[in-house]
Image: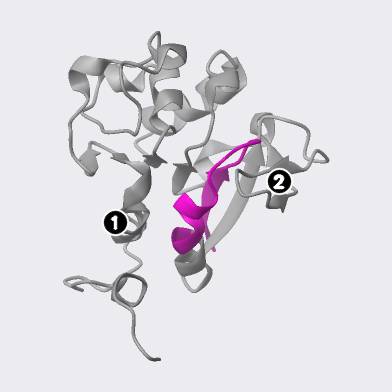
């Protein structure tokens, strides 16, 4: 079975990846969670969801995964965590798919990736905690950006983000239009 790695940390915005996680559960991909802390340490999301990560960052073997997903939240405490930034950089350097949403692209910046790609994020130049890692000249004012092997999105675009990640992983048959319509348009079923 193929694997997708989800980076989780205290304050991560679980709603930004909930639809993606749900859709992966019905695919050929297994979702594995990793945290910068000990795997016995429970991570608490922004919505107070408690998760026990499968692995720590230093246990991750990049070659075992097809993609890395980085949700938003408050990633500031990990900008200078070399284990986190080296793991992210390894995914990028090996051409593995990376999806980062909302504030998650700040970790891409800390890993030096934003110097090589166009991106979007829910961060602005007013977010002084992130200024040192963001390459503002490469930021696009768009809802979603795909550049090289990296997908970035603003936090409110979590459905489009999920759809693009799933598309890049070939979860949908080629040519499928609006594969996540169920989540976009209310129905009675």
- Please say if 133 is above or below 5: above
x and y percentages locating residue 69 in the rendered image = 46, 44
Residue with the mark numbered 1: 160
Q: Which quarter shows the C terminus?
A: bottom left
Q: Identify residue for label 2.
A: 53
Secondary structure of the residue carrying tag 1 is helix
Q: Quadrant of residue 44?
A: top right
Residue drawn at x 31%, y 51% as measured from the top left: 157
Horizontal side, residue 138 vs residue 55: left or right: left
- Residue 151: x and y in percent read 30, 42
Q: Residues within 10 Å of mark 2 (few under 14, many from 20)?
A: many
Q: Disc 2 on helix, strand or loop?
A: loop
Q: Residues within 10 Å of mark 1 (few under 14, many from 20)?
A: some
Q: Which residues are magenta?
A: 1-20
Q: Specify whether residue 18 is painted magenta.
A: yes
Above/below status of 16 relative to 71? below
Q: Decide whether residue 147 is among the magenta residues.
A: no
Q: Residue at x 38, y 44 (%)?
A: 155
């Amino acid at each position: 079975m193929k694997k997708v790695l989800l980076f989780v940390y205290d304050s991560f915005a679980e709603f930004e990846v909930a639809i993606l996680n749900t859709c992966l559960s019905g695919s050929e991909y297994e979702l594995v969670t990793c945290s910068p802390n000990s795997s016995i340490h429970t991570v608490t999301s922004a919505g107070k969801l408690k998760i026990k990560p499968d692995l720590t960052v230093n246990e991750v073997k990049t070659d075992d995964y097809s993609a890395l997903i980085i949700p938003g939240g408050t990633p500031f405490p990990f900008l200078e965590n070399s284990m986190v930034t080296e793991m992210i950089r390894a995914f990028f350097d090996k051409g593995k798919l990376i999806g980062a949403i909302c504030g998650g692209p700040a970790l891409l910046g800390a890993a030096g990736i934003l110097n090589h790609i166009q991106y979007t994020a829910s961060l602005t130049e007013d977010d002084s905690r992130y200024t040192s890692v963001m390459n503002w000249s490469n930021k696009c004012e768009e809802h979603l950006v795909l550049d090289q092997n990296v997908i970035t999105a603003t936090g409110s675009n979590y459905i489009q983000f999920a759809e693009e990640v799933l598309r890049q992983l070939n979860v949908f048959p080629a040519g499928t239009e609006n594969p996540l319509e169920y989540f976009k348009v209310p129905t009675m079923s």
